Amino acid sequence: MPRKGKRWIFAKHFDGFPKESDMRLEEFDIPALNDGEVLLEAEYLSVDPYMRAYSPSLKTGTVMIGQQVAKVIESRNEKFPVGTWTLPSCGWTTHSVNNGKELRKMPPLPADVPRSYAIGSLGMPGLTAYFGLLDITDPKPGETVLVSGAAGAVGNVVGQIAKIKGCRVIGSAGSEEKLEYLKELGFDEVFNYKTTPNLDAKLKELAPDGIDVYFDNVGGEFATAAVLNMKLFGRVSCCGAISGYNLKEPEKLSSIYSKMVFSQLKMEGFIVTRYLPRYPETVGILAQWVQEGKIKVREHRTDGFDNMFKAFTELFTGANTGKAIVKV
């Protein structure tokens, strides 16, 4: 009898908010290995907002995209013996066969650090926060940093790194529970964007002298208000635009160009894979900060592979605080 695995198939392109009928959970036969191949078994899977953003370019009938922490359970590749922990980008599947050519081993983690952190604060989200803040905006001690989506997987790490660098940090989130979480992390000022009637007035209240650095995870009206409150020579790191991912019609860009010109602002978008050669050294830095307690980690864990779609949609309803993961 062939061994069985499970996978989520991207069956239909999303039309607005994702529906479970857009996905299909199926069993499949795990194939035998050829020379050079390894069989991976997932332990943790990541769910992230970028999956929705990338979905229009995905082919239907294929496995939904995503990264996971997976163990080599069978090997015909001497570089990846049985028991090796890896970080494959093989999507929503319990098992996968990999030829090892682009397979990344999980970097060594301190003994007291859970493996799930390798797809969270010590993985893609943490690296996104590190490079997006430090390389794109180069914050200086004493500067004011605004982070939107601050209680999410990337935003919470951005705020904590900004504090490490001696900045004053303002964070926005969508619930009182999340605001308490941000306070625990050391954010100087926090506010609930959902209950704030006038974003412009709120930002002027919290940053009367203006914002030096804005780390944008949401786009939309919030980003417009943030840019209009930037200081001279302010810097904007464009990381995500989750406010518009499920819209059927794209948002129109607000007029921020006069502000960009006269305040001489810098705005730059980025995708974290451009920093791939620097991953190993940076994971080491982040791991040290975690061990020293300078970066605190919270995970929003969903148990059970069958609950992948539920965990994914919770990203867009505000249900998660910290990094969203699924334990198989």
Image: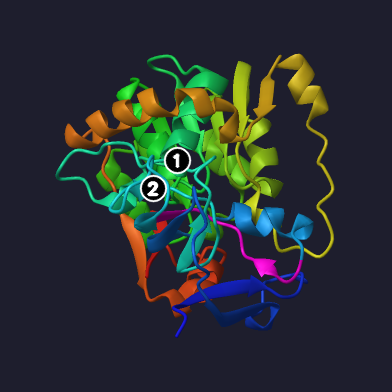
Q: Which mark is residue 86?
A: 2
Neighbours of disc 1 within 10 Å: few (<14), some (14-19), many (20+): few
Instruction: Report the amino acid beneath label 1.
Output: Arg
Please check the rendered image and state whether residue 45 is part of the magenta-colored stretch, yes or no. no
Write the start and end of the magenta stretch as one range: 60-69
Residue at image location 38% in from the left, 76% down from the top: 304
**Position in image of residue 325 (x %, y %):** 40, 61
Q: Farthest residue in the front direction?
A: 35
Q: Amino acid at mark 2?
A: Thr
Q: Measuring 66% from the left and 59% from the top, which residue is drawn there? A: 52
Relative placement, left or right, of 162 versus 62 is left
Q: Quadrant of residue 167?
A: top left
Quadrant that contains the N terminus:
bottom left
Residue 161 in the image: x percent, y percent? Answer: 36, 30
Q: Position of residue 266 (x, y in %)?
A: 67, 19
**Image quadrant in which the C terminus is located:** bottom left
Q: Residue shown at 39%/48% (left/top)? A: 86
Answer yes or no: do the residues labelled 2 and 1 have beta carbons within 8 Å? yes
